[in-house]
């Protein structure tokens, strides 16, 4: 056995990240020729169990690397790329985040590449594009239906269409060649590499005010090194102008900028602000793209063709050869944290990417997260402040309305009704915010107190009236018919309680007849283009009432809104989640920030049953920063994040007893190893104990020492997975954002 190694032929091996829910990479055998060709970061097709999967090469093993005799070495099926599709930095970013968030590396790797590449489609799928050169060729094509059809499709896309996409829509390559021969269309090969070119301005920058200047200069000064900034600026203080001017310095050097925005922030309006400032290619990456558009945008970033990449959370993993600056706007927004599967926080991973790239990152917000406030206190984020609204607008004044004593009509206080009428008379716009869609959140029987509850969740059904009357569970999606009479006592005494946006719309129509009332929520704007239409109306400066949910709260610039009313802030104050007050405060400030952005001063009215709530009072009598300071102080005393680091283990099964028993055993196991280092909370039932028919429970692990916490939890998590009964679903959430 011992002396035979020298004689046996060399075994060439590569290590592959395979998209399966396992924590290891796997070794495969390749030929000497394949070994020479294989690039780390390129795709391979391999058989795994009975499946054929697309994996990514993470390592070429040296010939003398020891052979793991536990597994039979399989050969790969084929090499799919002749070059790396993920560069070294992205590979490192993926490795780091898979390890930090304790998620299988193969799955993280897979989520970093566009779907078409995940499916094993050729890399240069879209490189060959066809374009019309003869715009008036219809008459020349009378004899061929196929050519006519192809011509029609190509006419729809003046910038060219990839051959693959044409093929998918039924246009044969032969037809294209025939048209090419007649000089009607021609074909272009998209180059795979762009040498960086300095970007020109398309529009003059605004003259920055003093605070903006300080912010821009600080960012520009650190362009060649890692530095993280917190741009803490009031709503409307001109944060975007700071981004644009800092970006220009980067773009001028032929470098790229990555701009990350919350899911809802990627409106055409945001994009057009970047587009109209610079002459350059902008790649957009968001969930609304189809697969080929996404691949195209991703490749434009990767080849350097696009100088600015604007995207939501996952755009973070896009390869960019000349990255010079990262901007993460509305950094407090919860949509930066992925809520299922690979539960990463884009803010933290983006900071790590900037660190790898040695470039600055700017986190901007009018209501920075308490986490970022904390990092700023520790000196890990450099604070930049904008304390005045740009363009001279004044911050709106806030008023609390005590719902316990106020006279009301349809749940709206008479004071507020008067104020709304006053603004409409002055031909101004009013924004009314209620974070609850549907008609009513509860349906009860007035005779016997029966309530319409979802049979699968610990939750009330929401009553919807459109497009037909029905009951809808917003947690699991169950839809039920509305009963004609009470199922318990048979009386016709069912009554909706509370109000959702659809109900408020009805009330507003009664209170303000003949006024333009527009509702914006997921139910009303699901049709493509409907939001754009509403947006155009808002910008026409006609009097109107805008009524809506979250969708209205963020980032929008509504210059004619002078009054903002928040109908119910109390639900956010009563939650068991210690971050609920932070979220409520952010929401209030963000919604309030839509008021008075133009020339006229704005006012904000908040309806509440708890006008004496200390948080509310700090927020209203002082400001968000005072609130944040107090909140951070409270968290320090209570030893809550960010003053301690947290990991949460969620458990879901058909029985709450099973959950509790298993979690108890597992926490004991952890305690044996970690001793007092980790504070263990739980197991406790989740705030919504039953969801979609399954019971939820969790434990929260807290420690002041992050490295040690992660060290113990990493080992423990593998044990937990080993002992886990197959009927149980477990997820681990590092730095959890919600206790639900
Ligand atoms: P934020 O992103 O902080 O909410 P915006 O960037 O949307 O603020 O700016 C609010 C408004 O102020 C915009 O209409 C913008 O054009 C204007 N603005 C920003 N900076 C300046 C400046 N230096 N001079 C004049 N107007 C400005
Ligand atoms: Zn009843
Ligand atoms: Zn339900």
Image: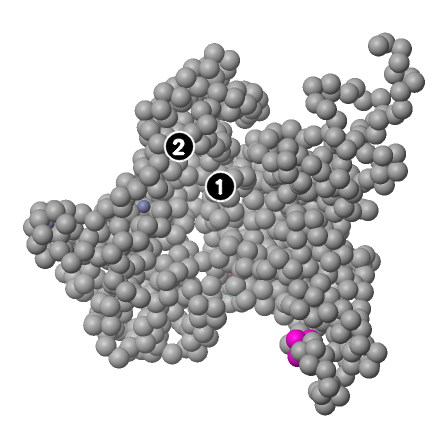
Residue bearing mark 1: 340
Residue 242 shows up from this direction: no
Residue 477 shows up from this direction: yes
Report the quarter where the N terminus lies. top right
Which one is nearer the viewer's eye here, 628 or 295?
295
Residue 252 lies, with reference to residue 517, above or below; the image says: above
Residue 381 lies, with reference to residue 418, above or below; the image says: above
Provide the residue span drawn in magenta.
Answer: 151-155
Q: Residues within 10 Å of mark 2 (few under 14, many from 20)?
A: many
Q: Which mark is residue 652?
A: 2
Residue 536 lies, with reference to residue 296, above or below; the image says: below
Q: Secondary structure at mark 2?
A: strand
Residue at 59%, 48% (x, y): give it: 314
Q: Main secondary structure of the magenta part?
A: helix
Which one is nearer the viewer's eye here, 536 or 224?
536
Q: Secondary structure at mark 1?
A: loop
Of callouts 1 and 2, the N-terminal one: 1
Residue placed furthest toward the bottom: 139
Residue 301 placement: quadrant: bottom right
């Amino acid at each position: 056995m011992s002396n035979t190694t020298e004689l046996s032929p060399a075994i060439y091996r590569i290590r592959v990240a395979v998209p399966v829910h396992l924590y290891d990479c796997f070794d495969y055998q390749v030929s000497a020729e394949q070994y020479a060709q294989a690039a780390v970061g390129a795709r391979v097709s391999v058989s795994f169990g009975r499946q054929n999967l697309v994996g990514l090469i993470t390592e070429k093993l040296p010939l003398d690397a020891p052979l793991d005799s536990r597994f039979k070495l399989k050969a790969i099926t084929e090499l799919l790329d002749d070059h790396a599709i993920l560069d070294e930095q992205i590979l490192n970013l993926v490795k780091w985040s898979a390890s930090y968030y304790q998620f299988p590396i193969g799955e993280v790797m897979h989520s970093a590449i566009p779907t078409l590449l995940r499916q094993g489609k050729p890399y240069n799928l879209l490189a060959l594009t066809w374009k019309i050169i003869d715009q008036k060729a219809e008459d020349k094509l009378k004899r061929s239906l196929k050519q006519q059809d192809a011509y029609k499709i190509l006419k729809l896309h003046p910038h060219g269409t990839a051959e693959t996409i044409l093929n998918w829509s039924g246009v044969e390559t032969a037809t294209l060649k025939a048209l090419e021969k007649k000089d009607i269309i021609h074909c272009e090969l998209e180059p795979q590499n762009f040498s960086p070119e300095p970007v020109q301005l398309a529009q003059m920058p605004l003259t920055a005010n003093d605070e903006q200047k300080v912010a821009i200069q600080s960012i520009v000064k650190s362009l060649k090194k890692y530095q993280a900034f917190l741009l803490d600026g009031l709503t409307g203080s001109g944060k975007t102008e700071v981004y644009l001017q800092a970006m220009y310095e980067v773009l001028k050097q032929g470098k790229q900028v990555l701009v990350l925005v919350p899911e809802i922030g990627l409106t055409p309006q945001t994009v057009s602000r970047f587009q109209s400032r610079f002459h350059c290619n902008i790649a957009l990456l968001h969930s609304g793209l189809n697969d080929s558009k996404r691949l195209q945008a991703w490749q434009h970033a990767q080849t350097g063709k696009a100088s600015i990449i604007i995207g939501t959370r996952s755009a973070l993993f896009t390869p960019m050869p000349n990255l010079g600056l990262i901007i993460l706007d509305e950094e407090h927004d919860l949509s930066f944290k992925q809520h299922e599967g690979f539960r990463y926080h884009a803010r933290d991973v983006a900071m790590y990417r900037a660190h790898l790239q040695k470039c600055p990152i700017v986190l901007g917000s009018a209501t920075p997260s308490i986490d970022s406030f904390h990092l700023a206190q520790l000196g890990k984020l450099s604070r930049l402040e904008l304390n005045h609204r740009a363009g001279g607008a004044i911050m709106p004044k806030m008023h609390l309305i005590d719902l316990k004593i106020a006279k009301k009509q349809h749940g709206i206080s008479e004071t507020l009704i008067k104020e709304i009428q006053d603004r409409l008379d002055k031909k101004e716009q009013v924004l009314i915010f209620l974070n609850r869609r549907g008609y009513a959140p509860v349906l009860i029987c007035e005779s016997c107190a029966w309530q319409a509850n979802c049979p699968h969740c610990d939750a009330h059904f929401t009553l919807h009236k459109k497009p037909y009357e029905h009951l809808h569970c917003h947690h699991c999606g169950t839809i039920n018919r509305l009963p004609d009479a009470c199922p318990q006592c048979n009386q016709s005494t069912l009554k909706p309680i509370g109000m959702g946006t659809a109900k408020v719309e009805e009330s507003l129509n009664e209170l303000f007849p003949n006024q333009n009332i527009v509702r914006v929520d997921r139910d009303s704007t699901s049709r493509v283009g409907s939001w754009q239409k509403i947006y155009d109306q808002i910008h026409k400066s006609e009097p109107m009432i805008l009524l809506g949910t979250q969708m209205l709260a963020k980032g929008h610039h509504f210059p004619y809104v002078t009054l903002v009313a928040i109908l119910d802030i109390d639900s956010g104050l009563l939650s068991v989640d210690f971050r609920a007050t932070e979220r409520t405060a952010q929401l209030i400030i963000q919604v309030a920030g839509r008021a008075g952005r133009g020339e006229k001063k704005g006012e904000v009215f908040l309806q509440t049953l708890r006008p004496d709530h200390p948080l509310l009072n700090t927020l209203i009598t002082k400001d968000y920063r005072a609130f944040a300071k107090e909140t951070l102080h409270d968290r320090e005393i209570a030893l809550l994040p960010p003053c301690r680091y947290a990991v949460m283990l969620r458990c879901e099964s058909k029985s709450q007893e099973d959950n509790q028993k298993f979690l108890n055993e597992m926490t004991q196991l952890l305690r044996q190893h970690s001793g007092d280092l980790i504070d263990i909370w739980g197991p406790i039932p989740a705030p919504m104990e039953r969801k979609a028919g399954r019971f939820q429970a969790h434990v929260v692990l807290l420690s002041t020492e992050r490295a040690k916490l992660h060290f113990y939890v990493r080992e423990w998590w593998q044990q937990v997975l080993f002992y886990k009964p197959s009927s149980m679903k477990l997820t681990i959430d590092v730095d959890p954002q919600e206790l639900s």
